[in-house]
Image (spheres, grey):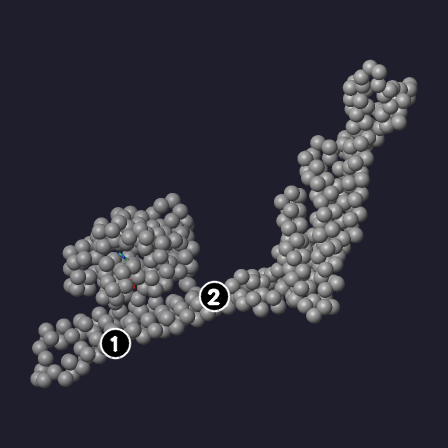
Amino acid sequence: MRALLRPVADPSSYLALIYSVARLPLALFYLVVLGLAFSLVFTFVGLPLFILFLFVIWWAVIFERELGAWWFGFELRPMSVAASAGRPWLERLVAFLTNPVAWKSLGFALLEIPAGLMIGIGFLAGLSLAVGLGAAPFLYTAGALTAQPGDPPFNAFGLSDTPFTLPLLILAAAIGLAVGVGLLHAARAVVLMHSVLTRAMLGVSEAQLNLKAAQQEAAVEHHRAERSEQERRQLIVNMGHEIRTPIASIRGHAESLLAAEGEPTAEEVRRYLDVIHRESERLGALVDDLLVVARGEAGELRLDLRAVEVGPIIQDVVAALGPIAQRDREIKLVAQLPETALPQAWADRDRLTQVLMNLVRNGITYTPRGGIVSVSAAAAEDHVEIAVADTGVGIAPEDMARIFDRFYRTDESRSRATGGFGLGLGISRDLVEAMSGEIRVESEVGLGSRFTVRLRRMPAEGRA
Ligand code: ADP
């Protein structure tokens, strides 16, 4: 009984009632539009008019869809899969006419004419009956109360005042109520039927949607492939530029030495060889970085991961770059290692060296003369942390998120003068992540930067 009366307390039932009654004007509308469309199709202006009416139907069914979605939460699929905005009108027209949904809308409207007429008229009749019967007792009472003395005996609905009047009036009201409740149930059924019909006829099919999704995915992949191709081309262009500078410098100094008239002094030879040495170092680092990029892209970057001592690696890096830093930039490069032995870290020895070389080289490059660059290491509960800190120019907050991107350089003109390539940090991050570690940066403009490499710490028994 409760289930039977549930629609009475549900506001959406009344919306469903309005929706059902509204079938009648909509059916009449479709009747007029389609009547005109089909009767004019054989005249000489018939075809354009037919298309025009097809448009009218299209917008009318869109209204129906949206109303259903708004009032009753119909699940809707789009009416078309291709975005038409911005395309020439002829292309849009062809797309419209070849969209199966446009023709299904026509089918929907055709179906709606008999169905809507029947539903609308049925509901109007039902409602009149329910309201008339339900209101009978009130009308009777009102009539009786307003009767003046001397009026003929009150005889509403043809019922004279007999002993049956009251039970008949109660029975009428009960039937009216029952018809009303029945109509609410029927209205809900109408809505349900329309939700199924709307989904089936007024939207693209699942297959069309899937096809569109696949096409979009393919377009994204295509775009990605193009971008990566462009990056590769960019890499080659940049590489050309970057490699030429040190090679030109090496060649120039070597030629000067060879072409020197008379015997060059030992001091001269040393000066020239220094430049040649430094430039070949730079070239070597560049090639190492490029190899990492190439292997990474080919999926062939294999790391020799094992437990390694980080102390000696730090000392090697400082020993290799310290003298150059001091001589060329008057920068002090220091290693700060704890007194007690550090635990071993999970890493590839050569790759970790490459990462630290990159970080220290950056530290030296972006620190003014007389500054300090330090490399320190410390152990924590589950990791070993290596920090490369400098007293340099620092990195602006807006650049922080991007400095690890390939080819990103915060100040193109300054970086170009320093001979950087914009690859070092990106590669360093790839390498550290391949060692299951992470790399972070903290920096303050004008004060300096601190890059921290965090590696997994090996348990004590894992020590060699
Ligand atoms: P580059 O070859 O240009 O040094 P990197 O990938 O190593 O390329 O660094 C990217 C950019 O990050 C650099 O161009 C520089 O602007 C900035 N950067 C890197 N390290 C530092 C640092 N220690 N201090 C200030 N800026 C830095």
Q: Which residue is mark 2?
A: 224
Can residue 109 be seen at all in this image of the molecule?
Answer: no
- Quadrant of residue 178 in the image? top right
Residue 151 in the image: above or below residue 424: above
Using a 10 Å C-alpha cutoff, classify the residue at mark 1 as few (fewer than 14 neighbours), some (14 to 19) or many (20 or more): some
Q: Residue at x 53, y 61 (%)?
A: 85
Q: Position of residue 191 (x, y in %)?
A: 72, 45
Q: Quadrant of residue 417?
A: bottom left
Question: What is the number of the mark on residue 225?
Answer: none
Q: Label 2, label 1: how many angstroms apart (C-alpha)?
A: 34 Å
Q: Earlier in the sequence, mark 2 or mark 1?
A: 2
- Residue drawn at x 21%, y 57% is 367
Badge 2 crowding class, 10 Å Cα cut-off, few under 14, some 14 to 19, many 20 or more, is: few
Q: Position of residue 69 (x, y in %)?
A: 64, 47
In the rendered image, residue 223, in percent from the top left (x then y), is placed at 48, 67
Which label number is shown at residue 247? 1
Kindly report which numbered mark, 2 or 1, lies closer to the viewer in this rendering.
2
Image quarter where the C terminus lies is bottom left
Secondary structure type for disc 2: helix
Secondary structure of residue under mark 1: helix
Amino acid at dot 2: Arg
Is the residue at mark 1 in contact range of ligand 1, meaning its CB lies under 8 Å from it?
A: no
